[in-house]
Image: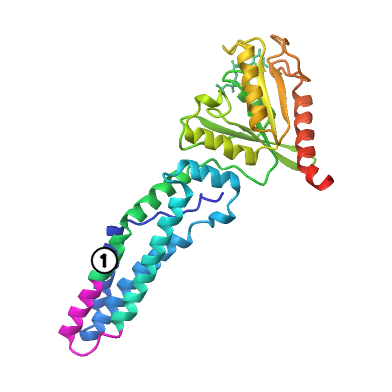
Amino acid sequence: MTFEDLPTVPRSEELIDKAFSRAARSGRSKSGVEAQQSMLLTASNIISDNLQNVTTSWPDFDALDPFYYELADAVIDGGVDSLRQHLSEVMWAGRKAGDIRSEYQSRLHGEAETARKIRKQAFARLADVTREVSDDLLALGEARDILKQLPDIRTEEPTIVIAGYPNVGKSTFVNSVTNARNEIASYPFTTKQVRVGHIERDHIRYQLIDTPGLLDRPADERNDIESQAVSALTHLADCILVFIDASASCGYPVDVQRTLRDEIETRFSDVPVLTVCAKADRSQDLETDHYLSVTEDEGVDALLEAAVAAVDHEIELPFDG
Ligand SMILES: Nc1nc2c(ncn2[C@@H]2O[C@H](COP(=O)(O)OP(=O)(O)OP(=O)(O)O)[C@@H](O)[C@H]2O)c(=O)[nH]1
């Protein structure tokens, strides 16, 4: 996944300490002007390399899959634009450290004592430049910690998203059809966890995603971040299964569940939305093609076939026409 490998972002004071203490060590093995030159080189290299590493370790946002772009935009304070801004500030500081190195290197000659003073000036400027981006480094460090928690979802895999009110049987279904133990991941902005499972048909892996906290209640009950996460899901889903518990043993009346279904259908208008009468062993009081009872093992395979067919149709459509 894109953000998984993001390395930690150093804080400015941490970086200054590291650069100056390594510089002192490298100066100790030499004497006179040479010691000052070695110190300048070590400190400025550490600062410019570290700052440049921060910027190059981030993915190119323009090349990011829209699902992750929108998620990142949702969970980061100030969105992706603020990240870009912080990164460009840090890049500026990295270059500036390199400039300071060149500028002072040419001035470090002659008397050892004069050279020491000039090297100290250089250190003061290196510290200033690094401190100038301390807020940017802090913000990037926080963003990195949040982004690393994003669910590891393969955007290139065909994806079936399961929606429906709590307790309608979504996870029972996902758990029963995906034999491998499901991956559980959490969105940084909700306490609930995304459940991801996989099925295979004709050597193609399909991803099944259950998104508690997102597609389990009406849009007007979602906060801004959740709404944007739903929007991110529109890039990912190739088919949606909306579970309705007609027995209403889940605690939600059927008409309320139908309203959620209609809303999801409107929101995900580009992909097939299949309405599933879940817990059909209890009640089948719903007009739909898909009746499912996981406990009685009825309709499970048929539903999967229908979902896979819908996904395949959806994915191939652009090539047909
Ligand atoms: N009778 C019957 N009960 C079922 C069936 N599928 C699930 N249940 C039961 O319904 C309850 C809720 O099922 P879950 O799978 O946890 O529902 P969920 O939609 O994932 O709920 P959240 O995790 O809150 O989103 C559990 O007690 C299940 O055992 C079914 O096909 N028939």
Q: Position of residue 125 (x, y in %)?
A: 26, 70
Q: Residue at x 32, y 77 (%)?
A: 101
Q: To which residue does mark 1 refer? A: 127
Point out the stretch of residues depicted in magenta: 106-123
Q: Was residue 319 drawn as part of the magenta stretch in this picture?
A: no
Q: Amino acid at mark 1?
A: Ala
Q: Magenta stretch: residue 107 in it?
A: yes
Q: Main secondary structure of the magenta part?
A: helix
Look at the picture and state if 190 lies above or below 82: above
Q: Position of residue 272 (x, y in %)?
A: 73, 32
Secondary structure of the residue carrying numbered label 1: helix
Q: Is residue 168 left or right of residue 305?
A: left
Extreme bottom residue here? 110
Q: Is residue 239 left or right of residue 52?
A: right
Examine the rendered structure and indicate whether residue 248 appears above or below residue 75: above
- Compared across the picture, whether 235 is left or right of 286 comes to left
